[in-house]
Image: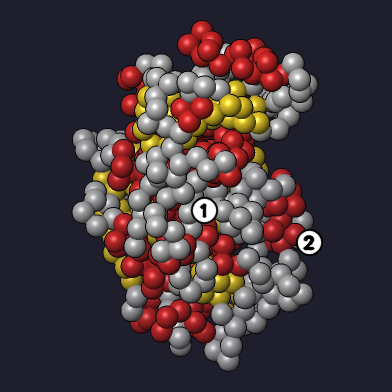
Amino acid sequence: MCTRVQPVEWTSDLNNQNFDGLVLVTQSHDTLPPELECLKAPLQDYSSVDSGLGEEVVILKVPGLPGNRLLFASTGPVNRDYDDVRRFSDAAVNGIKRALKAGMQRPLLVCPPHKDYKNSTLVAALGALHGLYMPIEVREANVNASDCKVCVLGLWASDETEGRRLVQLADALESGRLACRDIGGSDPERMAAPRVAEYVQELFKDSPVKVDVVSDLKVLEKEYPCLAAVNRCASSVPRHEGRVIKLQYCGEGPIQKTLMLVGKGITYDTGGADIKAGGHMAGMHRDKCGAAAVAGFFQILAKLKPKHLKVIGSMAMVRNSVGSDCYVADELVVSRAGRRVRVGNTDAEGRMVMVDLLCEMKEKAVRETSPQLFTIATLTGHAIRAMGPNYSIIMDNGPAHRNGNAAQWQKAGEKLGDVFELSSIRREDYDFHKGQSEYEDILQCNNLPSSNTPRGHQTPAAFLIMASGLDKFGVDSNTPLPYSHVDIAGSSGPFPGVPTGAPILAMATNYFLSDL
């Protein structure tokens, strides 16, 4: 297994011949700083014969520059009401893809700092690295002689201290996104639950992250009965057996905050007995991007080793299979918290695999320092219908709302382009999941797709709170526990395409990169 990140090198020399092409990402050649004055003339000459300069990526022959090539990828305007820092990552992705077509193997990325976007250079570097990601299946098949698409990515900065800082951050953040993409984007056999466990154990070998894998079926049934119900069908196929992967990081010094993360890791979602018909099953290997994000975040922790922070994670790795032993609607399952749950729709399996792990986190949280609990999942199609693609949604319970947690995540996400929309968990969401007869305490779901259900991305958060027993730890309790649910169905990335790694950039920025 290769998890090597694309190598990145810093330089302040625009004429460094160790590189074979210069990729310029900025709004316009007219706004270049004095250090990049030498790049203005060739771009001005080009614009005299093509007024469309800036509308698409262009390559110019410029003697003296690396490889005698200047590739210009304009961000376009960045000062309108609706512009944000993603303009820089988008331009860098387009630029690096064109550089690959041009045959560059050692491109030098130049993105001068922008007065309104202090992280524009780092965001552009992350955009370029996203464009250079090579899927693990391709790496392991040895289709190419190298594990990377280019030999090295150069990163220009005028100051050495700043340049080295940018390289360190880009390497750490990309290493987390690489792990997230590997797990989240790979096919349902390569990243079946047992193989995800192997990947994670190898990833964190000899690192500050501790890994514990729960695989025994009897233990899963006893400790996580809702997860075990989903796993019941897949457990008859050894290579599809479920796993709970537990991670822990404890930074140096007195702990000031404890993050407790539960990630949905559905390795493939057939819908179960409520099967995804009409072609809606394709792409459902991506239903593990929540758990993948948990692993990716821990990889960033392992790289940057933030102090005074403890993080506990659980990855719920289960395949929602269909067959003679699959769980079905109408079943009653008693959750870890002792709540009788009536299954309403087997395609609402994500909340089922997370709820007992969230309950376990709740049990631990009362003994931790300043705990914050989270579930992260590609949970609902309604999230995409409500907010469109590309956006994560975060919603708080009462204690988290009083702490302003969702707003903090949104603000942090703006810094590196890992953007969020905010939602609220309302009384109607709790009412929706109340048991409808004396048989059950809680209704798991209705029998409609979430996209056809009013408040379809908010109600699952209420279910998770109720079925885990977190409703006893609200603002009216003696031990209020802040909890936020993050739905990344829209932001996890396109299919076909490459997963984005959302929301790990926002998480890292919020909790230990606040100086960005």
Residue 403 locus on image (x, y percent): 50, 34
Give the CA separation, mark 1 to mark 2. 22 Å
Q: Which mark is residue 80?
A: none
Specify the quadrant of the image occupied by residue 96.
top right
Figure check: 316 above or below 459: below
Residue at the outermost front position: 63
Label 1 secondary element: strand
Residues 481 and 420: in front is 420
Q: Dot 2: within a 10 Å radius of its alpha carbon, few (fewer than 14), some, or many (20 or more) residues?
A: few
Residue at the outermost top position: 34
Pointer 1 or 2: first along the chain: 1
The amino acid pointed to by label 1 is Ile
Q: Quadrant of the N terminus?
A: bottom left
The answer to whether any part of residue 119 appears in the image is: no
Residue 512 locus on image (x, y percent): 38, 33
Q: Which mark is residue 452?
A: 2
Q: Which residue shows up at 65% across the image and 27% down it? A: 74
Residue 208 locus on image (x, y percent): 24, 49
The amino acid pointed to by label 2 is Asn
Residues 357 and 93: in front is 93
Q: Which residue shows up at 43% across the image and 24% down it? A: 156
Give the labeled residue for mark 1.
Answer: 376
Residues 429 and 422: in front is 422
Q: In the picture provided, is 349 more to the left or to the right than 44?
A: left
